[in-house]
Image (tube, coloured by chain):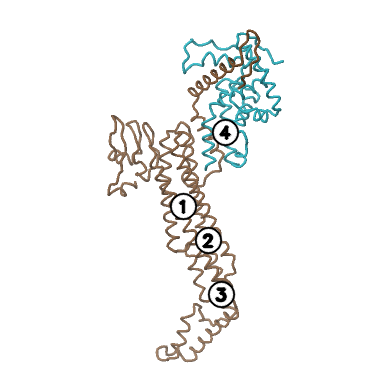
Chain colours: A cyan, B brown
Amino acid sequence: MQVRTDWISFYDTHYHRVVRFVMHNGASQADAQDAAQEAFIESWALMSSDPDRWQAITGKEAWIRAVALRRYRRPPGPRRRPLIAGDEIPDLPAPEPGHEELTVQAQLVLQALRALDEEARTVMAFDLDDIPAADIARELDITQQRVRDVKKKARTILKQELAGNVTPGRSQP
Amino acid sequence: MNSHDDTRPGEMTDTQLDQLLAAANRELLGHIETTADPHRALTAIMIGSTQEAPPSETATPAISHDPDRHPAIGMITIRLRARDLVLDLDSTSDIMLNGVPPRGLSRHYGSHHDLVVSRDRRRIFAIARDRRDARDRSRTLGIDKDPDNDPEKDLALDYERSSTWDLATGATDRTLLRDMAQDIARDRRRTRDLDSGLARDVDSVRDIARDIARDIDLVHARAHGRALGRASDLARNLASELDSALDHVLAYDLARDHDIARDFAHARALAQDLTHDIGFVLSSALSLAVELARDLDAQQVDASGADLSTLEIKHLDALDRTIWTRQTTWPPSIADQVEARSEEIRPGVYQIHFGNTSDRHALTLV
C-alpha cells in the first residue's frame, strides 16, 4: 500500500519535470508529454508487478528521465519528429510574459540547447534538473569524469549562444 | 549547477549563465504546469495498467475505463458494489461465527462418529456381530409373533435402536463394514462438494473486493483526490483478508485426506477449528468492508449533468449526499424517489438526503 502511495507522490512531483527534461532534449511539448506518459506507464507497471525491483532502483529521478528520453528517441514517426538545430523557431511572443505563452528566456534557452550535440544536451538537461553527476553517469553509462568534461564544454557553448553568438548546426568539439 | 568562473571577454559569466538557465527553467516548468494536465495522463496510466489485468469473474463488470465517462458514475458504482460486498460477507461470516460448519461439514462427519469410536477395525467388527446376534435373539424370542408382550423383546429392540445400521437382512460382518465404508465415502464426496461451494463463495467475494480496489484507483486518478487513497488501501486490505479466508477453506483438504475410518475424531476437530478460523477472518473482512463502504460514502459525489440512466441502483442510500442538476439523467425507476429525497442547495443545484428516516430500509432497495 505504501509503495503505491509513494509512487503517486513520485508521479505528482516529477511528471511536469520529466516533460521539461525531454523538451530540453529537443522535443516539442506534445512529444515530451507522450514520452513522459510512456515512461510513467512503464514505472507503474514495474511497481505493480515487482514492487521490490521498483524500490531497488536507486536514483529514480534520473531513471524515469532516462526512460522518457529513450521513449522519445525511438525511431521517429510522424508524431515524433524531433526538432533539430536549424529548424525554424516560431516567432517570439510579445514582450509581456504570460502563463499562456512560453517566455522569451525559456525559448532562447531551448534554442541554445539545440545547438549542442546529443550527449551534451542530455547531460545539461540532467544538470538543469539537479540530478547528481553519479546518477547521470549511471544512466548514460559513462564515467563521472566524462559527465564533468561534457558539462564544462556544454556550458562554454551555451555562454556563447546565449550571449547572442548564434551559429546554427554548430556541434561540440 | 556550476558557478565556477571561466569567462572569455564578451561572453557571459558563469554566474550570469546560471541565473539565466535557472530563470528559464522555472518559466518553462510554469508553462508546462499550466498547459499539461497530469491527471489526464495519470488516468491513461491507470487505464493502461488495468487493461492488462486478468479478467475478473465477478458478475458485475468493472466500471468503464472510458476517460470521458462522467466520474460520478464510477463513484456511485463503487459505492453500490461496496454495499453488495458487505451483505455477502455479513451472511457468510454469520454462518461461520455461529458455529454452523460449512454446509453441514461437521454434521456429516459426526453422523458416523458414534460408530467409529476406535481405530481398531476388529472392535467395529465385534460390535456389528453383537448387534446381529441381538437381532437373532429377538427373533428367537418370538418378537415377530407377539411384539408387545415379551420383555426380552425390549432388550433386543433397544439394542437395535442404538444401532444406526440396518440389520434386517442379517448381513455378514464383512458386508456391514463395506456398507459403512460406502456411507463414509458418500459423505466425503458430499462434504467435498460443500467445501468447494464455500471456496467459490469466498473466491467470488474476494474478486469483488479486488475489482473495487482497482476501480477506486481509477476514480482516484481522475479526481486526484487523496481522500480516496485510504479507501483504496481499505479495499486492498479487504482483498488480502479474503485471500487468507480462501486459504483456510482450501485447508479442508487436510481433513478430507485423513483416513476417516481411523482418524475420524481428529478430522472432525480439525474441521471445527477451521470453521472457527474462517469465521474470524471473515468477520475481520466484514469490518473492513463496512469501513470501506463508510469511507466511500464520505466522498463527495457530483453528478451534475451526468447520464446515469443505465445504472442499476439497487441500494438507494448509495446516493446519499449526491449533488445533481436538471441536466442529470436518473434511471426512470428511481427518478421520483430521488426528487422526493432532494433539496435545492443552490439555484438549480440539488442534493440527495436519506438521513436517518425510519423508513430508510424500505427506500434503500428498489
Q: Chain of mark 1?
A: B
**Depth order, front residue of A62/B109:** A62
Mark seen at residue B10: none
Tag 2: Cα neighbours inside 10 Å, few (<14), some, or many (≥20)?
few
Q: Does label 3 or label 2 sit earlier along the sequence?
A: 3
* Image quadrant containing the N terminus of chain B: top right
Residue, disc 3: B179
Q: Nearer the viewer, residue A49 or A5?
A: A5
Amino acid on which disc 1 is placed: Ala
Amino acid type of the residue that numbered disc 2 sits on in the rendered structure = Asp
Q: Does the CB distance between marks 1 and 4 fall below 8 Å? A: no
Alpha-carbon distance for marks 3 and 2?
A: 21 Å
Mark 4 closeness class: few <14, some 14–19, many ≥20 residues within 10 Å: many
Whole-angstrom CA distance, mark 4 to mark 2, is: 43 Å
Q: Which residue is mark 2?
A: B193
What mark, if any, has residue B285 been given in the picture? Answer: 1
Q: Nearer the viewer, mark 3 or mark 2?
A: 2
